[in-house]
Image (cartoon, rainbow, N blue to C red):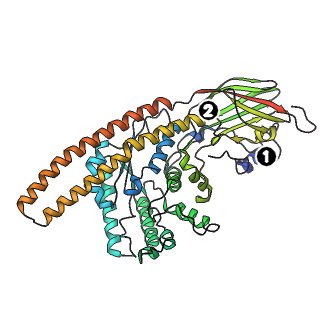
Amino acid sequence: MSFPTLKGRHFLALALAAAGVFADTAPAAEKLLPIPSPAKFAPPAGKIAFQDGDTLVFLGDSITSQCLATQYIEDFFYTRFPKTRLHFHNAGTVGDRAADALDRFEADVAAFKPKYVSVLFGMNDGGFTDWQEPVFEEFQRSMTALLDRIGEAGATPIPMTPTMFDALPNKLSNRTQEPRDGAYNNVLKTYSAWVKEESKRRGIAVADLYAPMVAVTEEKRRSEADWTMIPDTMHPTAAGHVVMAAAFLNDVVFCPPVSEILISKKNNVWQATVGNGDLTDLQGDEKVAFTFAAKSLPWVLPPEADEGQKLLPVAFKKPPALSSELLAVRGLAPGKYELKIDGESVGQWTDTELAVGIDLGENPKTPQYQQALKVALLNKTRTARTEHPMRIDWATLKAQRNALKAVEQANDNPNRIAQMQKSFATFLEGNQKSISEYVAKSQEIEEAIYAMNEPAARKYEVVPVAPVAGGQP
């Protein structure tokens, strides 16, 4: 991820100017970093704040079973709330419609005793054709039954709108399918509207994935006519899954800043105000130094997600601040300063830039970033070794169960039916054993994640490196 420049990182400038905050030490034109406030670290109305011991199940079709957006959402929780022990289970299955999820609900959802269940269906439910009223009615019935079933299991559903369908790759490859390619994304738009309306009716949070995916696609094609993040028309790349994860976090989840540190000099005395951490040993003379123990780490994703991070300002009218780690130092003599954390340089800024405030959340040089990256990479290993292959087992089970149902419903030869039932029972025993082993291994790796995600106390030093013209360092 690229380290953000000062541009675009101004924080509540007008409000601060009106309030006259730190008027004696902040640059007159750029009083931008607000005083850290406890209110920022308390859940606002309508946002979900997960509690220790909660389980979140991601229920959906093959887009969920790609295990990318789900992995990135998990990364957020592992790093933003390291002391809150949460558990996650991916329950996406290839080809599923909402009705199919009801068939596997007890074993693949309820068995994990979830507190929350995200629900992503629609891509398959619409039938990949133009508008069909009976098909839409079936989607409504199945989704309604599924949301009710989640509630009956003691969990809260978190509906997500369908993702977008991108017909352009088909057109560019001369494999256009009509009416699917010409109409289907608009069909999903209506399905998306229904999901939002039904969520509003029930008074539950909803994540709008459709709108930001369409927005970023339309904007990118203004300069790149063949741009897509859905190369097979249905399944997003890692970049698309970052947009999905950000939409979920932005719309549904309580997302406090990583931390906020405001150091200022008043009446020749250095003082500190902080949010979401503990600051000690503040010293100021030729350099400013202190120790800070944050309660969170920044949201860092594996390298393949870098492109997706760059899309977020395009995808959202107001880009979500999902990794805000702010530092401001006011009262420094004019000059350029180097910031060191645990003795290692993480960058250089002028006294004015430091007074305005810098955001370290996406700076790969900080030890916090590197620690969060290790968490993300271990979670990627967990996904690759357990969650993703487990979904293959579930897809195989679905195919075997459907084959047996077809024979039973056809009233085939009784001997053939009995033979298939016996074969299915043998298959099911091995299948469930394999799934149980994946679940156990997933939990084992999750324990390792929680053993490495605790933020450490870090030593900060703001050291002068050069004066500005006419000034002294």
The x, y position of residue 152, in whole percent, is: 29, 50
Q: Is residue 11 left or right of residue 296?
A: right
Which residue is located at x 47 percent, y 64 percent?
164
Instruction: Work out whether residue 134 or residue 26 is closer to the camera in this orientation and state it.
Output: 134
The residue furthest bottom is 179
Residue at figure coordinates x 39%, y 41% from the top left: 385
Q: Mark 2–mark 1 contact, CB under 8 Å?
A: no
Of callouts 2 and 1, the N-terminal one: 1
Q: Position of residue 269 (x, y in %)?
A: 79, 25
Above or below, comparing residue 173 to residue 79 in the picture: below
Q: Dot 1 corresponds to which residue?
A: 30
Disc 1 marks which amino acid?
A: Glu
Position of residue 284 relative to residue 120, above or below, is above
Secondary structure category for the residue under label 1: loop
Q: Which mark is residue 404?
A: none
- Residue 280 versus residue 234 in the image, above or below: above
In front: label 2 or label 1: 2
**Residue kind at label 2, given as amino acid type:** Pro
Q: Residue 367, which numbered label?
A: 2
Towards the viewer: 112 or 158: 112
Depth check: give the residue in front, 50 or 105. Answer: 105
- Which residue is found at the position 57% from the left and 27% from the top? 456
* Image-based side of 16 in relation to 116, left or right: right
Q: Is residue 75 visible?
A: yes
- Residue 386, x across and y down, in percent: 37, 42
